[in-house]
Image (spheres, rainbow, N blue to C red):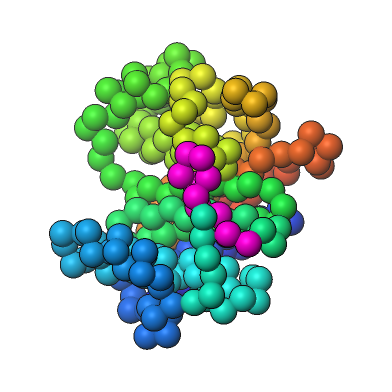
Amino acid sequence: MTISQLPASSSHWRLWQVDLDSTPAPQAVAALSEAEWERARRFVFKRDRNRFVAAHAALRETLSAQCGIPASMLDFALGPFGKPTLAEDIGLRFNLSHSQSLALIAVCENAEVGVDIELLRPMPDAWALADNHFSAAERRALAALPPEERDRGFLCCWTRKEACLKATGLGLSVDTRSFEVGVLPNVREVKIDSEDGIVYLTLSSFLGVQGALCAVAHVLDREAIPVPSRLRVNNEMFA
């Protein structure tokens, strides 16, 4: 199993990308809980099952390295809308996303974080999905893109929405059309109205390996320093 830390990491969060088709070490696999094995066994296809095992073994190894607790001793809990957290509150927040053979892991200290990753691919149902999940301004911006850029623009917006929802832990209890993230990979602040008040987040996008579209968001304290103007990964701007 190949776990690579990304140079896109910041003072707020750190990122790792995982090759899910590489074989995890036996000790990494052995660290999985019975609950994780139960979920793995639900997959019909062996490839999907193996990728799930690799993703969760990588998550345990990454968190173990960050907090010093053995991977097999980590216990997880679920938030009200299903977001996983460490059962023992040690000030470490994390999130995991995967798309086919790639996974993205984010770890943040004392602030909630969310990530999403999608491999670039044709999206024949992009317009129908955009109608249901994008704001009117985002749909107009998507339509304004050159035809050859619309799949990228759609997946850029989609990953940014997902990263924000995962960072807040609110999931689909929030209407994705009610907040703006845009179809371009700019760094921006996002405001989401929730039942508990307004949540502010910083949001960034970047390219991972194999041209994967990636987004990371973290909940922002209003006293936090301003967001950086740009983000680099392997010296390549997502533009």
Residue 48: image quadrant is bottom left
Q: How many marks do you count on the picture?
A: 0
Residue 28: image quadrant is bottom left
Q: Nearer the viewer, residue 29 or 37?
A: 37
Relative horizontal placement of residue 227, taking residue 215 as reference (left or right):
right
Locate residue 118, reporting x and y percent: 38, 48
In the rendered image, the vertical position of residue 211 relative to residue 4, given as above or below? above
Residue drawn 48% across the image and 66% down it: 59
Numbered range of the magenta stretch: 78-88
Q: Report the residue that reaches farthest toward the left.
A: 44
Residue drawn 51% across the image and 55% down it: 77
In the rendered image, the vertical position of residue 179 relative to residue 57, given as above or below? above
Locate residue 45, reporting x and y percent: 16, 62
* Residue 221 seen in render: yes
Q: Which quarter of the image is occupied by the N terminus?
A: bottom left
Relative horizontal placement of residue 8, taking residue 32 as reference (left or right):
right
Relative horizontal placement of residue 80, taking residue 142 as reference (left or right):
right
Locate residue 35, reporting x and y percent: 36, 64
Q: Nearer the viewer, residue 12 or 205?
A: 12
* Residue 62 seen in render: no
Residue drawn 42% across the image and 60% down it: 103
Q: Report the residue that reaches farthest toward the bottom.
A: 26
Does the magenta-highlighted stretch encompass residue 74? no
Locate residue 92, reporting x and y percent: 66, 59
The overriding secondary structure of the stretch rendered in magenta is loop
In the rendered image, the vertical position of residue 128 relative to residue 50, given as above or below? above
Residue drawn 43% across the image and 31% down it: 172
